[in-house]
Image (spheres, helix red, strand yellow):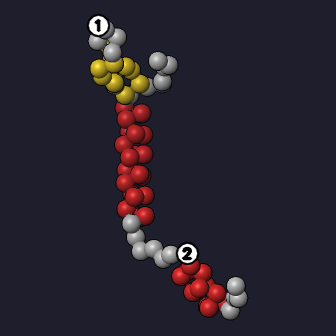
Amino acid sequence: MSQIAGVKFIKNASGKVTHVTLSKKHFAQLVEDLEDAVSLQKARKGNTVPWEDARKRINKKFGFKD
């Protein structure tokens, strides 16, 4: 397994990884990334309009023709 800065893998006697420790810096970055992912998922659940309907509205508003 390759080395990753700020990450330490703890293995048991048979060589299986049993624990992973992160530095405070990397843990904080991981938490921030997870919070961003949650925010993104919440934003995606907002009101959406199918593309065909949106295109019709835009064409009508600006006088475009298909």
Q: Residue at x 46, y 18 (%)?
A: 1
Q: Quadrant of residue 27?
A: top left
Q: Residue at x 37, y 28 (%)?
A: 22
Q: Nearer the viewer, residue 45 or 36?
A: 45
Above or below residue 45? Residue 15 is above
Circle 1: is it few (<14), some (14-19), or many (20+) Cα within 10 Å? few
Identify residue for label 1.
13
Disc 2 and disc 1: Cα gap in Å? 57 Å
The answer to whether the residue labelled 2 contacts the one labelled 1, judged by CB atoms less than 8 Å apart, is no
- Residue 8 point in image, percent of width and height: 39, 20
Circle 2: is it few (<14), some (14-19), or many (20+) Cα within 10 Å? few
Above or below residue 41? Residue 24 is above
Identify residue for label 2.
51
Q: Nearer the viewer, residue 5 or 56?
A: 56
Q: Residue at x 53, y 82 (%)?
A: 53
Q: Residue at x 70, y 88 (%)?
A: 64
Q: Is residue 62 left or right of residue 37?
A: right
Count of numbered marks: 2
> Which mark is first along the chain, 1 or 2?
1
- Residue 54 point in image, percent of width and height: 55, 80
Q: Quadrant of residue 62?
A: bottom right
Identify which amino acid the numbered label 2 is placed on: Trp
Above or below residue 53? Residue 2 is above
Quarter of the figure with the C terminus:
bottom right
Name the secondary structure under disc 1: loop
Q: Nearer the viewer, residue 22 or 18?
A: 18
Identify which amino acid the numbered label 1 is placed on: Ala
Above or below residue 17? Residue 34 is below
